[in-house]
Amino acid sequence: MKRLLSGIKPTGELTIGNYIGALKQFNEMQKEYETFVFVADLHALTVYNDPKELKEKIRNLIGIYLAVGLNPEYTTLFIQSENMYHANLGWVFECNTYMGEAARMTQYKEKSKNNESVSVGLFTYPMLMASDILMYDADVVPVGIDQKQHVELARNIAERFNNKYGETFKIPEPVIPKEGAKIYDLQDPTKKMSKSDDNEKGCIKLLEDPKSARKKIMSAVTDSEAVVKYDPENKPGISNLLVIYSSLKDISIEDAEKEFENSGYGDFKKRVADVVEEFLTNLQERFNKIMNDGVVDNLLDKSNEKVRKIAEDKVKEVFEKVGVGR
Ligand code: ATP
Ligand code: LTN
């Protein structure tokens, strides 16, 4: 069985963009692949987080993984920092990546623009991400479009390492959702909906009050044309709402367009709001039950054993090949 691996940083609160761009794919693909999904908590350290809040977010993210439908029968869920080997392999990869190549990463360029106090970790995190992926010989890595470049870097690192030291790593493929690879801010539909942004009105959080999410949809920015049509260039607001609607209903964008052929924006928004409200209500019900059931720790302990074994074997092989240790 081929392997799937992906992770999400426990920074900010997860948004409907994270669900549509990432979580939904993990869920749909888990039965076809041997699936590994983790909480990228070491990645969260690239920016400052209140330590107490970080712990809470890590636990909540596990709860969200389970609530969206990741099933421990198919998916090994784990916390990155609980497997020390990730950082070890990350270091080896930092030493096998060129400065110029790392400096080309768009996300780093954007996040460091006009900001002199970004951490070195923000610069090197794609190499830690390569370690997360290559450690498990992942065949596929489902991510939103913004992470595609980092998966490509991981491929380059793997190829370089294999050439230098002999066949060691599988070359992973990024998997980008056909629709919904990028969900936009409801107030500024040219900007990615992002969990670490403070634009409250533009962003729908998975754990927010479903009624407040409803209001946000109703006040989303649209245009003055009054035709519900998918046209991201000229109608970014309406197109974004169409993607959210079709994705949550699991229908194609064309079918969604047809449904609203004769609708005005008010009616359209109301229907999108209904779907979002219902989705959040159900998700939160499952989340609360999982968090109260006390099943999380047991599950993590079990999967830890499995991932540590895989990682230990891989890092031993790598250390041997590069020549460190006795
Ligand atoms: P941050 O704002 O903290 O950088 P983020 O919201 O971009 O965070 P990540 O942890 O970087 O979230 O992303 C987790 C996964 O969700 C990645 O696969 C990413 O591509 C995907 N993702 C994040 N935001 C969106 C979005 N607006 N639309 C689609 N996919 C998204
Ligand atoms: N950098 C990713 C999270 C992440 C990840 C990974 C995703 C860390 N390691 C490995 C896929 C595979 C982000 O979304 N910010």
Image (cartoon, rainbow, N blue to C red):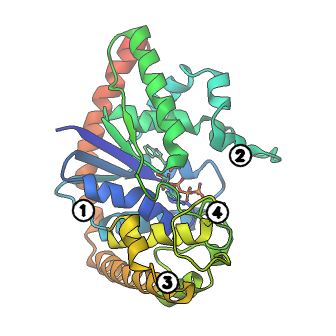
The image's mark for residue 110 is 2
Q: Quadrant of the N terminus?
A: top left
Q: Amino acid at mark 3?
A: Phe
Confirm if mark 4 falls within 8 A of ligand 1: no
> Disc 2 to disc 3, how far (Cα)?
34 Å
Q: CA distance from mark 1 to mark 4?
A: 50 Å
Nearest the eye: 314 or 266: 266
- Give the number of the mark in front: 1 or 3: 3
**Which one is earlier in the sequence, the residue at label 2 or at label 1?**
2
Residue type at mark 4 is Asn
Instruction: Give the residue pinned by disc 4.
Output: 234
Q: Closer to the N terminus: mark 2 or mark 4? A: 2
Residue in view at x 51 percent, y 48 percent:
145
Asked if the residue at tag 4 contacts the one at tag 1, i.e. Cβ–Cβ closer than 8 Å, the answer is no
Residue count near mark 4 (Cα–Cα under 10 Å), binned few <14, some 14–19, many ≥20: few
Give above or below for 262 relative to 108.
Answer: below
The reply to whether the C-beta atoms of the residues labelled 2 and 3 are less than 8 Å apart is: no
**Residue underneath mark 1:** 298
Spot occupied by residue 20 in the image (x, y as percentages of width and height): 43, 62
Q: Which mark is residue 285?
A: none
The image position of residue 163, as x and y in percent, is 41, 10
